[in-house]
Each structure stands twice: as structure tokens, then as C-alpha cells.
Image: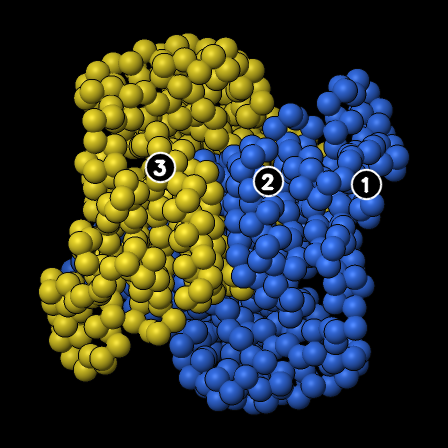
Chain colours: A blue, B yellow
Amino acid sequence: MKAEIIAVGTELLLGQIVNSNAQYLSQELAALGIDVYFQTVVGDNTNRLAQAVEAATSRADLLIFTGGLGPTQDDLTKDSLASVLGRSLHIDPEAMENVDRFFKDRGIPMTENNRRQALSIDGATPLPNETGLAVGNAIADQGKFYIVLPGPPKEMKPMFEKQAKPWILEHVLSGAMPLFSKMLKFAGIGESALETKLLDLIKEQTDPTVAPYAKEGEVTIRISTKAPNEQEAMEKLDVMEREIASRLPNHLYANIDVPIEKTIVDLMAERGLTLSAAESCTGGLLMEMITAVPGSSAVFTGGIVCYSNAMKEKLLNVPHELLEGENAPGAVSAETAIVLAEEVRQITDTDFGLSITGVAGPSHSERKPVGLVYIALSRRDGETSVYELNLKGSREIIRLRTVKTILYHLWKEIKA
Amino acid sequence: MKAEIIAVGTELLLGQIVNSNAQYLSQELAALGIDVYFQTVVGDNTNRLAQAVEAATSRADLLIFTGGLGPTQDDLTKDSLASVLGRSLHIDPEAMENVDRFFKDRGIPMTENNRRQALSIDGATPLPNETGLAVGNAIADQGKFYIVLPGPPKEMKPMFEKQAKPWILEHVLSGAMPLFSKMLKFAGIGESALETKLLDLIKEQTDPTVAPYAKEGEVTIRISTKAPNEQEAMEKLDVMEREIASRLPNHLYANIDVPIEKTIVDLMAERGLTLSAAESCTGGLLMEMITAVPGSSAVFTGGIVCYSNAMKEKLLNVPHELLEGENAPGAVSAETAIVLAEEVRQITDTDFGLSITGVAGPSHSERKPVGLVYIALSRRDGETSVYELNLKGSREIIRLRTVKTILYHLWKEIKA
């Protein structure tokens, strides 16, 4: 089964937006065991769109289109596909009702061009749009399969997940054993170190297969297997998960695709633990990431961004002698990190107090190098741990790696 | 002049990475006045790569390749292109020296396959790689132009900027008048409201041309003109900038591509003004964005994330009666926002104190709806302003829009 993803939209060709839809659909198709051979981007132009459809039909079995379903004369995807397939378009009554309701609810008169969003290709299965107006389509024609999805990700993703995927499983993959996957998430380890530990599993293409994915500050492994049903798949996946976990016990933090801060918030909420933070060079990034997790208010009460030395003294009681003077350790030091963590924990009366102080760059400070960062974790009735980090990269990357590292150490402390 | 961008790499087809190179190159080509008609992604496979090259050659004048220049047998871009053009490959001596030096400097033995990174197509101009090992290529062949760039953005971008762009200007656009552009940045106004104000300029395709770009929370206008030299271009661009500025005086915050927080930090530093913040529902996002600007320490001293009511009382002296009780306004109220802004300003002794308190969702709080947010700005020896926002969208979008809105109001206060 070969697939091609065709994104339609002049805004992509002008570089106004990045083609994140192609990435999302490629991941989803990979997870279904479908190979994507080409991704194409084409503008809102009838001839070139028809050219792209013909090229893709000649080389792929499944064509997935995104974009070009809107109300304007520039939105041509369904028209072009219908024309290549020698079919006509009609107004889908349910989709039309959805468009009418939208304008009625808002008390806005519907302009005639909005009827275009309810157009469906003759003989296609209409794919309802739960988060927008333009209806999608799924068509089987002469042994090829065509799926038409809207461009905005907030409409495309739910339509793919709820409408197109079940249609693919039923019509395109019918008879084939479905593919089941699990995402394993790792912290505190780089992609290459992790690959080294799992090299035999990755290279031998065992069943389940093991494939690593990396992005800044985190590593993910997808394990996949084909099986007649979910239960049999999960049995195989669980065995592989245990094998991997036994090799990396201090790094595997979740077996679903969540960031580590979500795992931390859930674990701490479950155990009734609370958290606070004092941030210098990261300027609030740690607290921002924790509070981005819905429900974080059960765990996180507050904290302090102490960017200047004066604020470290005033808000967090760091002794002046520690910060300034010829032989003082300075703001970027293990000593200061420890005081910050302990003070913020005491001030907020929380179980854990985290602190970060360092040089994020681009220029150095206190004659200390860019990338030198101290992080500390203070716990109620426990020892305070402090770590020195020597990071490379831009200001943004140093800040992000610092936060990911302290989250990793916090997770290690609470998981036990 | 029609261009096509061809990204080579199986990791793109698996959705492991997003094709940000295509976006970058599309923007750069648009700025040069070159139309991109197609973007294609193809895997590390000789046949399909040759197929993509042939299709692109038949429909475009300029083909830009990214990726597939690495040391392994999977890196096939130059081999495939050479084969389609009927040319051979040779080792480029300067590129080979660069590879040799890299391994020598690190004291690592060079494996033979790394020689592949110094391969150049016969007759091509080698494009040196200043941030990596694989050499790029630029070729003119039978009226068509081919440029081969590495895949990693940190190698691709400098090579495009310093090597490929000058080559395009000299060989592809020679004789044509170069295009000059300026980016105008707007805050506090949505894309459609801004377009309405500039509709005549956008629609009439005046010289300079006016093109809007939008992303979450900010709107950008690119104005472009062709001229024999920079001075003549800038004169025309300046006239258009003044016309646009006169229509949107309270929204145009910069004429270079910077976020509003950068403009704020620069303006405040210039005027010797300082800033602090108290954040509830945004959890540190405002402070994180401000401190992401290099040099922000001249302006920003610190602040407090007061996520819980207890912390609002303890760290920012919000009276208990304001927060709790049957007829209390509650944490999410104009009254609380005002106290937070004034208190954080006084505690940190800064010229401006900003505050944010609201319901970011997904669940409501204090029986107030998701998206209700109060923001306040306190200034030394001045009145405190407070704004009620009613925002829609996910938790992430509500938090981002809140921060962009308060930055907009701060900019308006200091720009005068």
C-alpha cells in the first residue's frame, strides 16, 4: 500500500505556513503500516492541481489531500479531483445544514459562496466536519483511494482521526492485519545513547518493530506490531515494553505520548505532593511548562522569577555575601542554587522547591561561560540535591535543556 | 521564473520531522520574486528520486534540493541528480580538506564513507558548508538551474544565504531587477481587521506590493519592490511604510521582523525603564517571553507566579476578603488584577508592574467562564489600567493571546 499526501494552498508555496499536516498524516499512516512515497504541495491553481492528481494517481494507491475546501473561488481541491475522476459535485444535505446552522447561531447572513463548503463529489462518502464547515470526502475509484480533508489542523486532525481513519481501516486495509503501536517516552538520555542501548532491537527489525523519534529535549520510541486484534497486539507490545524498560529503568517515564511535566503533575497529584520554583536564567520557562498541564493547580502553587541579584536577595533571602564580592561564589553557583531552592520551598510551604541559575547567553556573566547552569531540588525533610550543567547551543536551547534536565531529576526523585 | 523545492529524506515521509526547509526556502524565493509552483518530498530511493527530478525538470526552471548529502549509502541526492543530468561525480578538494580537518581536530579516525560528503557534480559550482561537512552544488544545465543543499537547517540556511542566494542573483536572475523587502509588524489587531484597512493596497497590487502574513497572536506585512539598487528601493518602501503607518498608528510596532517583546525591551532599555510581573493563569509565560530576549536583564528584574490564592495573599498581599467569601470579587477579577500589578511593582521597585489573572481552562473556576482574563498595568506615579478579556480557544491559545495582549498595552504605554 503506497500513499501520497497532497497539500493544496498557495500560502504553503509562499512559505507563510509550514506543512505540519503532512507530518501529522505521515506519522498516522506510518502507524497504520502504510508507506508514504511522496508528499506534494501545490497551489490553488486548477491546471497544476490536476497535474499533481494525475502524477499521484499513477504512482500511489491512496491519495490524501489537505486544504482547498474553503468557500472562495480559490478553493479548488474537490472541483479538480472530481474533474480528474470524471465525476460531478453536489450539495451534501447534512453538510449544508451544518453551514446554515453556523450562520444562524451567530445571527450572520450566509453569503452564497459558503454553499461551496457543503460540496461533495458524486459517489463519495461525506466526512462530517465537527470543528468547522467544509465537509470532507472519501472515494474508492478504479482500485485507488482518495481522501479529501480540510487544511486547518484543528479541522483536519479530528476529521482524520474520527472519520478518515475508520474509513481507511474498513476500505483500504480491509483483510490486512491492523497495526497497533505504543509510544514510549524517555528523559535524561540523548537519542544516540538510547539507540546504542536498543541497537539490536532497532536493527534486527524484531516484532514488534522499534523506531526512535527525537525532538529537542526528549526522545520517543514507537513500538508497533500487526495482530488480528488489540488484545494480542498489546500482549506482544507489553513484552517489548518490559524488555526496553529493563534496559533503561531510569529513563522511561511514560508509555503514552505525553511530555514529562504531565507525568510529573499526575504523579504528584496522586501522591498529594506540592511544588514551587525559583528561576533565574530560564525566566519562568519551567513554571510555564508545568502550568501548561491542565490540572497543575493541584500540585503547583507558585514561584518566583529572580532575574536580578537584587531580587534574589529581596524575594529569596540569598545572602549578599554569596552574590557579590571578590571571593563570592556569585549568582551562578551551586551555593546560590541551593539557597534559592530551599528558600522558595519554605516561602511557599511546598514539598519540593526547584531552582535554576545560570548563563543562558548570548553573552557571559560573572566571567562564567555561556551554558554553565546550576539546578537544585530541595525536598521537605530531605537533603537538597544540586547539579552543575554545561550546555551548548543558543539561548533558547540552553533554557529548554535546563528545564528538561531539572524535570528529569524531579521525576527521578518522585517516581520511587 | 518557476521554482520547485525537493526535499529528500525518509524521515520526512515517516513524519519524524516537519519540512521547515521548504517553508524557509519558499519565503526566501518569494522575497527574490521567484514563484514556487510545487514542493515535493521524496525518500532516500534512487528510482523515486530520479522520477521526482524528471517531473520537476519538466515543469520548473529552478530546482532546489535539500537533504540526502550525508555520508551513508542512503544519501543519494547528488548521485541521482548527476545521473539524470548525465554527469559524473568527483571529490572536491576544498570540501575534502574540510572533512579531513573536522576529524583531525577531534582526533577521530575518518571512516571512508565520509568522503561522500565531499562529492561534487562535474561542472557544478561547489557551495562550501561553513557549519557542517557536506558540500553543496549549483549547476546550470540546458537552461535549467539546480541547487543542492544539505538537510539540517543549521547547515542549509547559512549555505543558502551566503552561497546559493548570491549564485541565484548572478546566474538565475541576472539582468532582472532585484527585489527588496521590508517586514512591518503589528500588534493588537487581527489579520482581517488589518486587511480591511489596507484592502486597496493589497488588492491593487501597488508598487511596492503589500502582502499580509499571520501567525497566532501577531500579524506581519511584507512590502516589496524591484529596483536597480537598494537606495531607490528603500525610498519607495519608506513611502509605503509611512502610508501604512498613517492608517494604523497604534498597531505598527516595528519595521523589522522581531516579536513585540523585543521592541519593548529595546525601548525600555533606551529609556531606562524597568518592569516586573505577577502571573496567575499564564504561569510564567509572560516573563519567559520577555526574558527570551537577549539583554532583557537591563529591563526586567523579576516577578512572581501566584498560581494559588494562598500565594496571591502571601507573596502579593491580596486581601483575603477580595479572594474569598460569598460576595468577594474573587481571584479572577479586575480588583485582584489591580492589586497584583501594583503590589509586584512596589515589591520589586520597578517603573511598570504587569499582572494577569484569569481562567485558561479547560475547566472553569470560581464559576467564571473559560477565557475570562483580567490584565492590569501599574506605573510609577501613574494610574493603573485594567482590561477584561474574553478569549476563545484552547488553554494554550488563551494563555498566548493573553500575553500578546498585555504586551500590546505595555508597548502602547511606553511608545508615546
- Position of A336 with respect to B375 (left or right) is left
Q: CA distance from mark 1 to mark 2?
A: 18 Å
Q: Relative to the observer, which residue lies in front, B331 or B169?
A: B169
- Position of A288 with respect to A294 (left or right) is left
Query: Residue drawn 52% across and 25% down?
Result: B188
User: Residue B29, labelled with which disc?
Assistant: 3
Q: CA distance from mark 1 to mark 3?
A: 39 Å
The three-letter amino acid code for the residue at tag 1 is: Asp
User: Residue B226, labelled with which disc?
Assistant: none
Q: Is residue B83 positioned above or below A160 on the image?
A: below
Mark 3 burial class by Cα count in 10 Å: few <14, some 14-19, many 20+: some
Residue B131's quadrant in the figure? bottom left
The three-letter amino acid code for the residue at tag 2 is: Ala
Q: Nearer the viewer, mark 3 or mark 2?
A: 2
Report x, y in % for residue A217.
Answer: 45, 65
Residue A257's quadrant in the figure? bottom right
SS of the residue at dot 2?
Answer: helix
Q: Relative to the observer, which residue lies in front, B289 or A358?
A: B289
Query: Residue drawn 23% across and 80% down?
Result: B111
Residue B25's quadrant in the figure? top left
Q: Chain of mark 2?
A: A
- Position of B115 with respect to B388 (left or right) is left
Query: Residue drawn 32% across and 32% down?
Result: B32
User: Residue A122, labelled with which disc?
Assistant: 1
Dots 1 and 3 on the same chain: no
Q: Nearer the viewer, mark 1 or mark 3?
A: 1
Q: CA distance from mark 3 to mark 2?
A: 24 Å
The three-letter amino acid code for the residue at tag 3 is: Leu
Q: Is residue B236 positioned above or below A208 on the image?
A: above
